Image: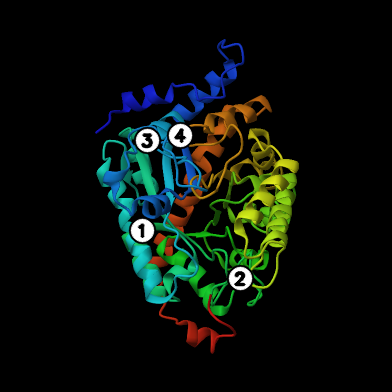
Amino acid sequence: MRRAILLLSCMSMVAPGVASANGASDPVVARVEAVLARTPVIDGHNDLPEVLRGRFGGDLSKIDLATDTSHIVPPAGEPALMTDIPRLRAGHVGAQFWSVWIPVTITGPAAVQTTLEQIDLVKAVAAHWPRDFAMAYSVADIRRAQREGRIASLIGVEGGHQINDSLAVLRQYYDLGARYMTLTHSSNTAWADSATDAPVHHGLTPFGKAVVREMNRIGMLVDLSHVSETAMRAALEVARAPVIFSHSSARALVDHPRDVSDDVLRLVAANGGVVMVNFAPGYVSEARRRWDADLAAEKARLDSPPFGGLYIGDPERAQAALAQWKAAHPAPVVGVADVADHVQHIRDVAGVDHVGIGSDFDGIPEAPTGLDGVDKYPALFAELARRGWSDADLARLAGANLLRAMEGAEAVAARLRATEGPLQATLEALDGPPKSAAH
């Protein structure tokens, strides 16, 4: 087991991109190092398990996370890995929610099986590198792991489709270690509307509200990233415990449906929840969001099977034309300051107690310049320190806010379990015949 002194040694490292340009000691860097040594980063969302499954078949003998993986050449069209143990240490990460995401195209019993396999993979990673990772299921576990000099590993289920419309499955995920569930992913479920799908349910159905209530009862954080604004509001009306947005940013700055409006930010503050800022370039830069839309339109114009596109049936010509378009229309640069703007905005609207970090590393095709891996968190904190953030407020952002919300959810669950039994409601009993295909 790695000793605490080793963790402090790792935490004293200056993160790349943070030191002053002339190489001299930077007092802001020193401040950030001290803050994060005391209050390590808790990141709400990292998709490394899916990468391990997709690229390596879940075979941990094919990848050594104990070494810097940034130089491994990725498959064509895929980004380099953003996560490994040396970079987690350099980035002062003390706890990580690992997403056990599965595609929305996997439904029914297959969705449950695939989710169980992803949960098993997270636990296998912790078992494979036990000096560095420790599974955590509570705030007490997180703090214990940090005292031991290990990185607390938590599980987040990224999509309500993964429970196959069953509260019993939800409870079993909790028993296996899942401590949050995102109510939807990119498509609607049979009981909740997604931010990126045509609305069907006007937010949450009666069964969807039952899911929120049962999550509160068992102590699983309700994650409202990916859901529609109407679903956000419905969940916040029902919730009896703090909610989180595990990886979302501010919609007032970037008009993307995956971001959170000011009205909802104020509701999150009243609820005691936390919005954990996503690093995806299109979620933190309005110029990049519009460029992404233009790129998608250009792809469709060039090659849009089965009926359209200038070069349909000629993929090489379409690819060459798209390369010419990109050369003439370079992507806007997105950097640390863009992410800091969202952190600052959420603080300004909801308050400093309601903002956190949810990078989405290894789940996004690229990251902002200067924030391209888990070693770069100090660059963001240094930017905020230069904007006037106090050490105490930086610590709240790093992890104290998430710990407070999680403690609140644990306390609510302890109270509710004493008076309420498991909810036995079914989708059919509460919602009646389905309005449309479930997914």
Q: CA distance from mark 4 to mark 1?
A: 26 Å
User: What's the residue type where badge 2 is placed?
Assistant: Asp
Q: CA distance from mark 4 to mark 3?
A: 15 Å
Q: Residue 96: percent from the left, percent from the top?
A: 43, 44
Query: Which label is found at residue 330?
Result: none
The colouring scheme, among rainbow, by chain, secondary structure or one colour, is rainbow
Q: CA distance from mark 4 to mark 2?
A: 34 Å
Which comes sooner in the sequence, label 2 or label 1?
1
Disc 4: which residue: 40
**Which picture quadrant has residue 108?**
bottom left
Disc 2: which residue: 193
Residue at figure coordinates x 31%, y 36% from the top left: 132
Disc 1: which residue: 118
Q: Secondary structure at mark 3?
A: helix
User: What's the residue type where badge 3 is placed?
Assistant: Ile
Q: Is residue 213 visible?
A: no
Q: Residue 240: percent from the left, percent from the top?
A: 53, 63
Query: Which label is found at residue 85?
Result: 3
Residue at figure coordinates x 48%, y 36% from the top left: 374
Between residue 283 and residue 267, name the one nearer to us.
283
Q: Residue 169: percent from the left, percent from the top?
A: 37, 71
Q: Residues within 10 Å of mark 2 (few under 14, many from 20)?
A: many
Q: Is residue 385 above or below residue 124?
A: above
Q: Is residue 47 visible?
A: yes
Q: CA distance from mark 3 to mark 2?
A: 36 Å
Q: Secondary structure at mark 4?
A: loop
Q: Is residue 227 above or below residue 337?
A: below
User: What's the residue type where badge 1 is placed?
Assistant: Gln
